[in-house]
Amino acid sequence: MTDLRELREGLRAAVRGEVDFGTTARALTTMDASNYRRVPLGVVAPRDADDVAAALSVCRTYGVPVVPRGGGTSIAGQATGTGVVLDFTRHMNRLLSLDPEARTAVVQPGLVLDRLQEAAAPNGLRFGPDPSTHGRCTLGGMIGNNSCGSHSVAWGTTADSVRRLSVVTPRGERLRPGQAWAGAPAGLRELAEGELARLRTGFPELPRRISGYALDALLPEKGADVARSFCGSEGTLGVLTEAVVDLVRAPRARALAVLAYADETGAAEAAAGLLEHGPLTVEGMAADLVPAAADLPRGGAWLFVETGGDTEGEARARAETIVRAADVLDALVVTDPARQRTLWRIREDASGTATRMPDGTEAWPGWEDCAVPPARLGAYLRDFRGLLADHGLRGSPYGHFGDGCIHVRIDFDLLTGPGVARFRRFSEELADLVVAHGGSLSGEHGDGQARAELLPRMYGPDMVALFERVKGVWDPDDLLNPGMLVRPAPLDTNLRFSVLPSEPVDVAFGYPSDGGDFSAAVRRCVGVAKCRTTSVSGPAVMCPSFRATGEEEHSTRGRARLLHEMLAGELVTDGWQSTEVRDALDLCLSCKGCRSDCPVGVDMATYKAEFLHHHYAGRRRPAAHYAMGRLPVWLGWVARTRSAGVVNGLASVGPLARVAKRLGGIAEEREIPRVAGETFTRWWRGRKAVVPSGAGAGAGAGAGGGDGAGTGDLVVLWPDTFTEHLSPSVGQAAVRVLEAAGLRVALPPTLRPGGRPVGDGRSRSAARLLTARRGRVCCGLTYLSTGQLDHARTVLRRTLDLMEPVLATDAPVVVLEPSCAAALRTDAPELLHDDPRAARLAARVRTFAETLEQYAPHWDPPVLDRPVTGQTHCHQHAVLGDTADRGLRAAAGLTGELSGGCCGLAGNFGFEKGHYEVSVACAEDQLLPAVRQAPDGAVVLADGFSCRTQLEQLAGVRGRHLAEVLAEALG
């Protein structure tokens, strides 16, 4: 029995990097992107090769296994273990050198692939292999799995790009594996030379043979390449500390031919015939993985075939040659880089979207990447589909058709005993089918625990025994990643789902996409780790807190892992009261970016609200929850007492402001926003009716209890808390523009009938009218974001009561604040899943631009002819969409693109004590650089109050809502 205290202290004394045996560190590394889970003893982040050697020495002394880990995106379970995890992403993550003349780079194992690509690009170079996880997978992990990616038909696997390695053996020897037996451990050459006949005949010849050890690379006719034989060993032979890799010349221009076929079999049969034309990629996928709105040529399956050239014309010509050579239903050739990226994103996101069947059923890896000779792919796919049908299973194949490698997620039932038994039977039969077609059990992601048990079916017992002997030469103590590749754990053990509750957990939200089951919602995270990308392009948002801190616990995946362990109860043992989960969620900005950017739709903002609701049930909350979580109450009190001037005056007095911020849990670096002297609704009640040009007299108050104008469609303008109390100018501008567009504006009712309806519910008793109470609509946003869900329910039910007269009409509800619109459109119906009125209200919600697009389609906005800068609101990106906004900006002559990301203020988040530095880092990620780099005269657009406040406080820049910009241009 290992003495954990002695082990921990021994590591801390020997290693200069971090040694963490805490609950959070262990919980974050229990899983990779596979179906498997193992709980490690601790995590070590080595600083260099000396640290690696020291950690191995200590662990060998205590007999504790070691698991090297990179980005944790492995799909077969090889990045999980029960001993000590070596995390290379924290320190050993650098590009050490790049030689453009020799076309080589020296990298550390924790370097993310995209960082190498970015450094090589200015020299016209790149690293050939490019898995779809290129934004977060590491070079060490790629070498460990011999990863490939979509360009393998042109540039091969990772092993084809490795020149020399630096490795520390489990017994501390420093080796430099390369060709001609360089860096071979003692005994390896003798062992290989005694088995030459087996090495020459025992390995199938196909481009994607990844399973087992690549011992045929040790043949003399193949250069006795020890480095190549090390690739794909899945961390079982030695620990990689450095690598010299080859780079390839990147084509100056590219074209993408999208070839449409009737079905995936037709696409698969055509793929091999395209290779003679020298394409860079031949990728395939079928319609069941493609979004309905995707702009693809007509068909049921597609090949994505990329070509290169020195010029765009040359690349296009090669693509058109392929189109002519292919027997297709339809085709599309794209040379615009932006549109190519959009199309490639469809393919790259398949690893996540494939985890859900079209009906929402869960699907899982396990048989993720079998490979067969490309010429046999069509026949294999037909047999594969037949095997699925025989077992009553479903899956959506996609992948590297040009290399005969198929990815698929299958709707295994991994939650029940019979389902797991079927998983085993299917796995055994599929292994036999792959071998019958001359294929490899793994074509990219390695064997791990998912397939290693079945390697005898592919290689036979004698070759597997040879694998074990090689493992013994490199690792005689079986210290590294035991249970992988040789002497493997059974494929149906250590399943990560087995520890979750068998009955649904009692929760507040409805989780409609997960059958009301919070465990199923948490299971959505399969570890794809798109949230771990350190840079985003275009409008993407996820995950701003990870980009700010670089810490796994502040990624969407990390938080999901902690919630998984909370539900499991083995490692995180205090359930909803867990401080580890609370601390990880503390830096979640509730930006909802993961709801749209995560390929599997994890919604961490909702999970955070759910957790806070339970965590603080019956307990004292942080001061910020009372100060900012109940902001509508305090601002309503200021409005009723007409004390805005007094409040603003007190907030401008330094000592008083500091006391107020301390009591309210507000960061001392923040300025308290000024409260408007006149609320929006008070302005509304006092204004004179305005009749738009060419319109007759209005119909009066309509649904809103205030003055309206015009004879156009009635729209109900939602006076959200921020517009009402903090920026009424936005509401005033919106009224002006909406009326100029010929619409009739009203505000929601403020009178809520008391008592109960009588008769059929349509009549109202006098008693109801006499007991009516004044009220104000509210989306409950501030209560939702702080997890005060009981208060949120109360506020939302009161709002629905007030809105009943509006819901009885066809009027849209125009919401100017994107966060409030998102709360009404998604959070309200999910929280009030038992009240159909919430869904009806959600269906009525429109943004400012959507209202003009749908209800004033013939109105022409004023033309400004000016560039714009700023940021698409994160909730708009994630929930609402910005198509209408783009159209409105274009019609108004506002040119340019808005950045993505999150402003970092995010409602109460950036104001809370302890969040200021992360808030600023989020703003510096995209928003502030975009504003600084904007051309002269650019309009700074920021539809969210938080975004405008962040700009003002950090950059001294006034951002404006689109309604304000248009209203000003009306003259």
Image (cartoon, rainbow, N blue to C red):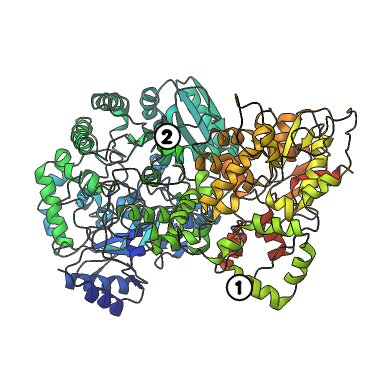
Relative to 966, 762 lies left or right: left
Relative to 513, 907 lies left or right: right
Where residue 543 appears, as percent x and y from the top left, is: 51, 54
Residue 242 shows up from this direction: no
Q: Residues within 10 Å of mark 2 (few under 14, many from 20)?
A: many
Q: What residue is shown with label 1? A: 662
Where residue 786 appears, as percent x and y from the top left, is: 54, 56
Q: Residues within 10 Å of mark 1 (few under 14, many from 20)?
A: some
Relative to 19, 493 lies left or right: left
Return the residue found at the far bottom.
13
Query: Please, what is the three-letter code of the amino acid marked with disc 1?
Result: Arg
Q: Residue at x 32, y 53 (%)?
A: 31
Looking at the rendered structure, the secondary structure element under dot 2 is strand
Where residue 657 appears, as percent x and y from the top left, is: 69, 73
Q: In the image shown, does 373 or 760 lie closer to the viewer?
A: 760
Return the residue found at the far front.
767
Is 562 above or below relative to 964? Answer: below
Quarter containing the C terminus: top right
Where residue 188 appears, as percent x and y from the top left, is: 15, 59
Is 751 above or below relative to 644? Answer: above
Q: In the image shown, does 948 or 435 lie closer to the viewer?
A: 948
**Quadrant of the rendered image containing residue 912:** bottom right
Quarter containing the N terminus: bottom left
Report if the CB atoms under discs 1 and 2 are less than 8 Å apart.
Answer: no
N-terminal-most mark, 1 or 2: 2
Query: Please, what is the three-letter code of the amino acid marked with disc 2?
Result: Val
Q: In the image shown, does 911 or 936 lie closer to the viewer?
A: 911
Mark 1 or 2: the one toward you: 1
Q: What residue is shown with label 2? A: 282
Q: CA distance from mark 1 to mark 2?
A: 60 Å
